[in-house]
Amino acid sequence: MQINYIETNMIPFFLGFAESIKWPDIGAITPGATPMGSPFADPLILLGAGIVLIIATILVLLFMKKIIVNTILGLILWSVVNFIFNANLPWLPSLVVAAIFGPAGVGVMLLLRFFGIL
């Protein structure tokens, strides 16, 4: 039987280290206290936070819907221009312009390419 170095030296070392730590008494929690002082331990606060986050998401989607659609259309148009029509636009700058300005940005990049600026 071969004796392992970890079994003979390391395990007693770690057991001694674990025994020397002053662990808190788990049963000594004050009644009515929230664990770790978290305000989300109260179910009403958790429910209220969930409702507020849902309403905020709906409002953001309502107000930013046009921006999101514009970005998606710009990226689709950028892919068509770059990969199907092979316009040889600079990759990263044209991608960023398409994502920010949408189809209008792609149009400007094509005009700059036509006039030889890009």
Image (cartoon, grey):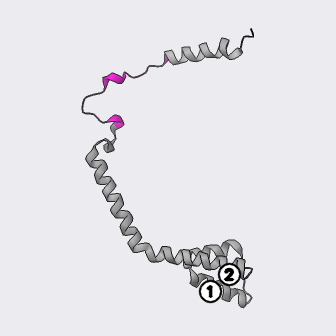
Q: Which mark is residue 107?
A: 1
Going by the image, does 12 lie left or right of 18? Answer: right
Going by the image, does 50 lie left or right of 84? Answer: left
Residue beneath the point at 52% across and 18% down: 18
Q: Nearer the viewer, residue 96 or 68?
A: 68
Going by the image, does 77 lie left or right of 45? Answer: right
Name the mark nearer the viewer: 1 or 2.
Answer: 2
Q: Secondary structure at mark 2?
A: helix
Q: Nearer the viewer, residue 117 or 46?
A: 46
Q: Secondary structure at mark 1?
A: helix
Q: Which mark is residue 2?
A: none
| Principal secondary structure, stretch drawn in magenta | loop
Residue 93 vs 55, above or below: the answer is below
Residue beneath the point at 71% across and 15% down: 5
Q: Which badge, 1 or 2, is on the more N-terminal residue?
A: 2
Identified by mark 2, the residue type is Val
- Look at the image and say whether residue 68 sits in the magenta stretch: no
Identified by mark 1, the residue type is Gly
Q: Is residue 89 visible?
A: no
Q: Position of residue 115 (x, y in %)?
A: 72, 91
